[in-house]
Image: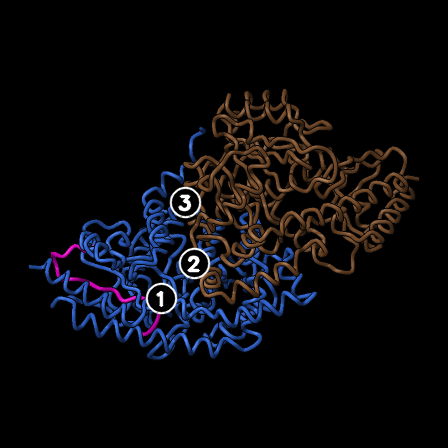
Chain colours: A blue, B brown
C-alpha cells in the first residue's frame, strides 16, 4: 500500500489513546466515571420524540429535515443560538457570525484547516483536553503547554510563551475545564482576549460546559472582551440537548465564518438536517429553559454527592477541585499513588475513571497521581458505592 | 489576523465555486436541473416519521439514538450495508470493513487525511466531480485529469499517467458518473483494480448512484476485482434514503478502516446517532426494497421524458448521454454555444442547469459548450416546459 501521509505518524500516540477512550465508553456493566457522556436521564427523549413525530409529518418542515440544507446551518437554529445562548453570554452576534458544525469538536478541525500548516504552534493548557490535541496532531501542529494554577491559564506564562513560540493559536476551555473543572476568572479572560489582539494570535475559546452551571455567578466569555475578531468560540449541543445529534457551533467574524464554511464543504457539506430541525424546534418551542433547569438540578446533586464521598473516602492528602458546573472533578492523589496502575485494579472491581497522566501533553513525569472523575453520568448509589470502593483501594495501595 | 494555512490559497478557486453551487440550490422559484438533490417525492418521509416516533419512544433504542456512539458507526447499520448492499454487489466484507461517515464525501476527506501530503498526485476523470476536487485541493494534492471516452476512463491513458505522475490515488465515479452519466465497463473496472495493485495506487471508487439503476444490467464493482486491498469504496445514503441524514460509508481493509476511524475521531468523533438508528431500522424493517423500486420508477420516467424532450427541442448537432441510472444527462451543445453565457439567459427565464466548463479541472478551453442536467429533481411538466424553453433559447442564440 502507498505510504501514509506525514500526519498519520504525527497523530499516532494520541490516536491510539483516543481509540481506547472511545472503545471503553459503552460497557454497561461498569460504573464509569471515565467518559464525558451526559446522563441518560438528562437526554430530553420525550421532548425530541414529540417534536420528531410532529415535524416529520409536516410537508415543509419534514422535507427540510430530510433534504440537503445549507452549509451554514439552519437559519432558525442559528437564530436561537444568537438570541438564547450568545446574547445572555454578552456576545453580540448575528446569524452570519454562526456556523453549525457536526459535533462541538468540528470547529477545532475546521479552524485548523484554515490556519494551521505543519509546524505551526498552538499553546494549550496543562493538562489539556486530549481530544483536541489529537486534532492538532493530525494537522501537524506543535502543541506547547502553558502553566495553569487553580484558576486556569497563568497569563504571564502565556505571554512569555507567545513571545518565545509565536503561536498561531491559543486553545482553552475556560469554563469548568476538561479535565480539571477549573474556571478562568473574568480578569484573565479579558487579558487573554487582549493578548490575542496585541500579538495577533487566535484565541480558541472552547466552552461546551459554560451553560451547565450549578453554583456561583456566570462569567463573561473571552469573546465578549474581543475587540479585533481574534477570539473564536466553539460550543456544542452535546451537553444540553443530545450528543448523538452531533451538533455544535462556531462563532467568529463573518469573513472567517466563510472560510470555515469552505472547509466544511470540503469535509461533510453540512450537518444533519433532521438533527438541526429538532434542535431548532427544541429552542423555538421553549423547551430549553425548563430542560436546562432539570439537568442542572440533577447534576448539582451528583456533584455534591461525589464531593462529599471523595472527602469522606479518599486518602488523607488527596486534593481535588470543586467545580461550579460542568461534568468533572480533578483529583490529585497523595504522592506515590499511580492512577494508571490503580485503574487496572479498579476495573477488576468494575469501576473506571480517567487517569490524568496522558492529558499532560508535551510534559514528562507529571500527573501520574491525577485522575478525572465524571460525576454527571452515574446514579447516586453508584457514586456512593464507586467512590467508597475507590477510596478503599487507594488507601490499601498506599500502605 | 494570522496568516491562513497554505491550503486556503490552494482551494480558493474551487471553494468559491462551491459556495456558489450551495448558495443556488434552494431557490424554490426556479426550475432547477442544476443541483444534485433527490426529488422531494423520493424522500421516504412517512417511513422515517413512523420509525422515529416509535424508536424515540423506546427506552433503549431511543437513548442509543440520542447518546454518543462508536466512531465505527452502529453495528446494525454496518450489518445492513454488508448484507443488503455489498453482498449483492459482489463485495465480500464484514462489518469491520465498514466505517459510517457523515455524508458520502467524508470518505474522500478521511482518505486524504490518511494518504495525501501536499504535492501528492491524484488522477481524476475529465470532467470530474468538482466537489471532490475541492476536497483534494484542500489537501494540497495535484489533481491530474485522465482521458475519458463514451464509457469513462481510458485505461491506456490512466496507465501512462500512473507512470508519468506516480499518483497516490485514482479517483473515479464509475457508475452513472457525475457529471456525465457514463458507466465504466466491467472489463475496465477489472483493469483499474489491477492497475491499483500493480502500481501500488489507491483506487477510490465513489459509487453513490450505483443502486439507482433504471435499465440495463448491474455491473460488478471495481472493489470486487480487488485482490490486494488497494480499492476503497465510498458510498452514500443521500440518494436512496435521505441526504439530510448526512450518512455514507467507506469500505476498505480493516487496517485502513482503523486509520480512517482515527481521522474521523479527529474530525467529528462519529456520525449522528439518530440518523444512524433511523437508517438501520429502514433496512431492518424491510422498507428498502419497496422504496428502492418506487424511486427507480419515478426517476426512470423523468429520465425518459427528459431524453425525449432533449431529442425534440435541443438544436441539431447536440450530443448527450443516455444514462441507465443516476441523476444526470450530460449535454454537448453544437460548437459555438457557450453554456455559461446561456445560463445567464436561462436564469432570467427561471430555469437553471449546471454549466460544464468548471468541471474540467486542470484543462483549458474545454467544455464551454457542455452542461449537466439533473432529471431526478424536477416534475414531469417542469421537465417538459424547462427543456423546451432551453431548446428555444439555444436555437435562438445559435442564429
Give the residue pinned by disc 3. Answer: B262
Marks 1/2: CA distance? 23 Å
Give the residue pinned by disc 2. Answer: B68
In the figure, B351 relative to B130: above or below? below
Displayed quadrant of residue A298: bottom left
Q: Which residues are magenta?
A: A324-339
Q: Which chain letter goes with mark 3?
A: B
Magenta stretch, main secondary structure class = loop
Q: Is residue B17 visible?
A: no
Q: Earlier in the sequence, mark 2 or mark 3?
A: 2
The reply, left or right, for residue B47 in relation to residue A47 is right
Do marks 1 and 2 both belong to one polypeptide chain?
no
Closer to us: A101 or B239 = B239
| Residue at 21% across, 59% down | A370
Closer to us: B263 or B89 = B89
In the figure, A71 relative to B113: above or below? below
Q: Which chain letter goes with mark 1?
A: A
Marks 1/3: CA distance? 27 Å
Amino acid at each position: 500500500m502507498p505510504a501514509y501521509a506525514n500526519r498519520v505518524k504525527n497523530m499516532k500516540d494520541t490516536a491510539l489513546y483516543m481509540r481506547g477512550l472511545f472503545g471503553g465508553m459503552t460497557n454497561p456493566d461498569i460504573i464509569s466515571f471515565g467518559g464525558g457522556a451526559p446522563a441518560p436521564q438528562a437526554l430530553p427523549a420525550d421532548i425530541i420524540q414529540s417534536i420528531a413525530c410532529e415535524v416529520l409529518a409536516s410537508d415543509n418542515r419534514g422535507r427540510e429535515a430530510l433534504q440537503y440544507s445549507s452549509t451554514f446551518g439552519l437559519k432558525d437554529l442559528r437564530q436561537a443560538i444568537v438570541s438564547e445562548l450568545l446574547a445572555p453570554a454578552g456576545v453580540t452576534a448575528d446569524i452570519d457570525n454562526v456556523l453549525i458544525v457536526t459535533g462541538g469538536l468540528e470547529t477545532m478541525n475546521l479552524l485548523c484547516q484554515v490556519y494551521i500548516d505543519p509546524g505551526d504552534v498552538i499553546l494549550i493548557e496543562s493538562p489539556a483536553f486530549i481530544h483536541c490535541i489529537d486534532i492538532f496532531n493530525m494537522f501537524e501542529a506543535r502543541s506547547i503547554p502553558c502553566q495553569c494554577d487553580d484558576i486556569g491559564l497563568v497569563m504571564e506564562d502565556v505571554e512569555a510563551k507567545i513571545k518565545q513560540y509565536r503561536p498561531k493559536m491559543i486553545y482553552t476551555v475556560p469554563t469548568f475545564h476538561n479535565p480539571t473543572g477549573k474556571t478562568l476568572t473574568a480578569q484573565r479572560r479579558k487579558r487573554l482576549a487582549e493578548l490575542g489582539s496585541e500579538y495577533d494570535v487566535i484565541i480558541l475559546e472552547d466552552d461546551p460546559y459554560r451553560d451547565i452551571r450549578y453554583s456561583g455567578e456566570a462569567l463573561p466569555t473571552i469573546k465578549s472582551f474581543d475587540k479585533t475578531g481574534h477570539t473564536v468560540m466553539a460550543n456544542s449541543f452535546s451537553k444540553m440537548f443530545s450528543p448523538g445529534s452531533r451538533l455544535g457551533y462556531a462563532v467568529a467574524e463573518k469573513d472567517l465564518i466563510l472560510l470555515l464554511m469552505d472547509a466544511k464543504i470540503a469535509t461533510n457539506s453540512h450537518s444533519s438536517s433532521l438533527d438541526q430541525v429538532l434542535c431548532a424546534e427544541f429552542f423555538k418551542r421553549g423547551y430549553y429553559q425548563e430542560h436546562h433547569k432539570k439537568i442542572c438540578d440533577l447534576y448539582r446533586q451528583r456533584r455534591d454527592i461525589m464531593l462529599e464521598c471523595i472527602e469522606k473516602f479518599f486518602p488523607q492528602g488527596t486534593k481535588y477541585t470543586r467545580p461550579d458546573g460542568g461534568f468533572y472533578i480533578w483529583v490529585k492523589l497523595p504522592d506515590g499513588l499511580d492512577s494508571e496502575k490503580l485503574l487496572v485494579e479498579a476495573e477488576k472491581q468494575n469501576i473506571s475513571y480517567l487517569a490524568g497522566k496522558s492529558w499532560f501533553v508535551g510534559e514528562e513525569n507529571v500527573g501520574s497521581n491525577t485522575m478525572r472523575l465524571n460525576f454527571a453520568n452515574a446514579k447516586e448509589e453508584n457514586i456512593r458505592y464507586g467512590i467508597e470502593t475507590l477510596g478503599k483501594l487507594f488507601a490499601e495501595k498506599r500502605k
